[in-house]
Image: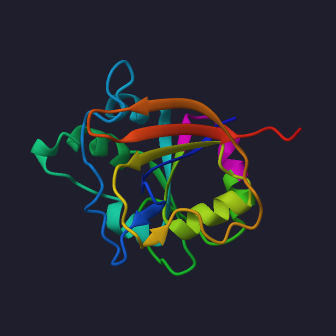
Amino acid sequence: MRKVILDLAVTLDGFIEGPNGEIDWCIMDTDIGAGEKNFLETFPEEIDTVFYGRKSYELYGNYQPEEESGFKDFYDKINRMKKYIFSSTLTNAGENTIIRDKIAEEVNQIKNQKGKDIWLFGGASLITAFINNNLIDEYRLAVHPVVLGGGKPLFQDIRQRLNLELIEVRSSKSGVTSLYYKPASVK
């Protein structure tokens, strides 16, 4: 069965956006996960599908970074993947699939299809829905060395405790620490 992987940047104080939606705090550094397992090279090889909320899709669903950023090849690969947009208001997503309701049923059906793992890109409301429906198989949080003091929290409106088991830690020269977790087994 395919895994749903939540992989995103978060501040040290738990925010995924600043108070005005800004993400300028996010270190766009190609050394994140560097070494044997460079994120920019390995992550696109692990996945073939991306899940977006409507806002995230509109902002990043076809993102094209500058050539010199070091992220162009990464996003070129991501942009060619199968995309599902979870929205009750979006009317057209081109060749991509819009999921309007029955999130758990739809996601479990997709997870049971042949293919590589699935990236849960976000946003916050979609992440909350996935957590509350136990649909995330792995959490990869790139913790950035910045404290915003406010903004959009990663974890909000969670209905029940979520126990996680640490499976890996990766650090980078930039100060970003990537924490890899899986849901802990209930004992």
19, 21: nearer the viewer: 19
Which residue is pictured at 39% across the width and 67% down the height?
17
Q: Position of residue 70 (x, y in %)?
A: 18, 39
Q: Is residue 66 left or right of residue 88?
A: left
95, 129: nearer the viewer: 129
What is the magenta range?
108-118
Q: Quadrant of residue 39?
A: top left
Query: Taking 32 as reference, is 154 above or below it?
Result: below
Toward the right, the furthest residue is 187
* Residue 86 showing in the rendered view: no
* Residue 60 showing in the rendered view: yes
As for residue 113 lying within the magenta part, the answer is yes
Please identify the quadrant where the C terminus is shown: top right
Which residue is pictured at 61% across the width and 39% down the height?
181
Q: Is residue 84 left or right of residue 177?
A: right
Toward the top, the furthest residue is 36
122, 169: nearer the viewer: 169
